[in-house]
């Protein structure tokens, strides 16, 4: 089993198709929705984490693309220069996934990469420029 993150963009007419149901039932893929922007009658986008066998993930992505859903792997990561952080908390105000939070025990910043969807909002929010996009896998 492997986990992989994708950005999905789907056309308005796909809204009435049970795409996620088929991913689960036909390809045994577990779905974790990390971010959703869905407006009725408009193009929508989702950031998903999919978990399944390598073969099933491939087949599931193919199924989505056959249904006019574009699937881009999310291979970017956020790199944080923790050693220079002054724990001002600015970045926590923009991180809506909860990947960046102040630890109530010592008021130091904590970063949870598993919650990060690489929205990049923290990059301009840090006065010391401590976040960078890492494009390596
Ligand atoms: S890119 Fe930054 S703001 Fe966005 S989810 Fe990741 S840590 Fe939070
Ligand atoms: S904004 Fe920058 S300096 Fe402030 S807590 Fe976040 S990473 Fe640290």
Image (tube, rainbow, N blue to C red):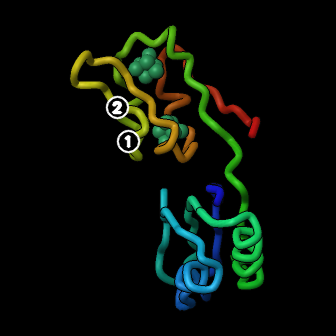
Q: Position of residue 56 (x, y in %)?
A: 71, 73
Would you place residue 25 above or below residue 109 in this image? below
- Separation of marks 2 and 1 at Cα, in angstroms: 6 Å
Q: From the viewer's perspective, is 91 left or right of 50?
A: left
Q: Position of residue 24 (x, y in %)?
A: 55, 79
Neighbour tally class for label 1: few under 14, some 14-19, many 20 plus, Cα within 10 Å: some
Q: Please name the residue shown 47% across and 28% down the image.
A: 125
Q: State whether label 1 is within 8 Å of ligand 1.
A: yes
Q: Which mark is residue 65?
A: none
Q: Is residue 121 shown to the viewer in this render?
A: no
Residue under circle 2? 101
Would you place residue 87 above or below residue 114 in this image? above
Q: Which quarter of the image is occupied by the N terminus? A: bottom right
Q: Is residue 33 shown to the viewer in this render?
A: yes
Residue under circle 1? 98
Q: Image quarter for residue 14?
A: bottom right
Confirm or deny contact between disc 2 and disc 1 (CB under 8 A).
yes
Secondary structure beneath label 2: strand
Q: Please name the residue shown 77% across and 83% down the image.
A: 66
Secondary structure beneath label 1: loop
Q: From the viewer's perspective, is 89 left or right of 137?
A: left
Q: Please name the residue shown 40% across and 38% down the image.
A: 94
Residue 3 or residue 43, whichever sits in front: 3
Q: Please name the residue shown 73% across and 81% down the image.
A: 63
Q: Image quarter for residue 43?
A: bottom right
Q: Position of residue 92 (x, y in %)?
A: 37, 32
Neighbour tally class for label 2: few under 14, some 14-19, many 20 plus, Cα within 10 Å: some
Q: Which quarter of the image is occupied by the C terminus? A: top right
């Amino acid at each position: 089993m492997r986990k992989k993150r994708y950005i999905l963009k789907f056309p308005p007419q796909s809204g009435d198709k049970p795409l996620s149901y088929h991913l689960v039932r036909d390809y045994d893929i577990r779905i974790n929705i990390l971010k959703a922007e869905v407006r009725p009658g408009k193009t929508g986008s989702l950031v998903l984490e999919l978990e399944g066998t390598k073969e099933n993930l491939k087949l599931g992505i193919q199924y989505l693309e056959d249904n006019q859903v574009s699937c881009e792997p999310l291979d970017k990561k956020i790199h944080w220069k923790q050693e220079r952080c002054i724990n001002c908390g600015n970045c926590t105000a923009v991180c809506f996934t909860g990947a960046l939070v102040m630890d109530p025990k010592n008021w130091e910043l904590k970063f949870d990469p598993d919650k990060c969807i690489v929205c990049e909002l923290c990059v301009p929010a840090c006065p010391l420029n401590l976040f960078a996009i890492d494009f390596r896998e």
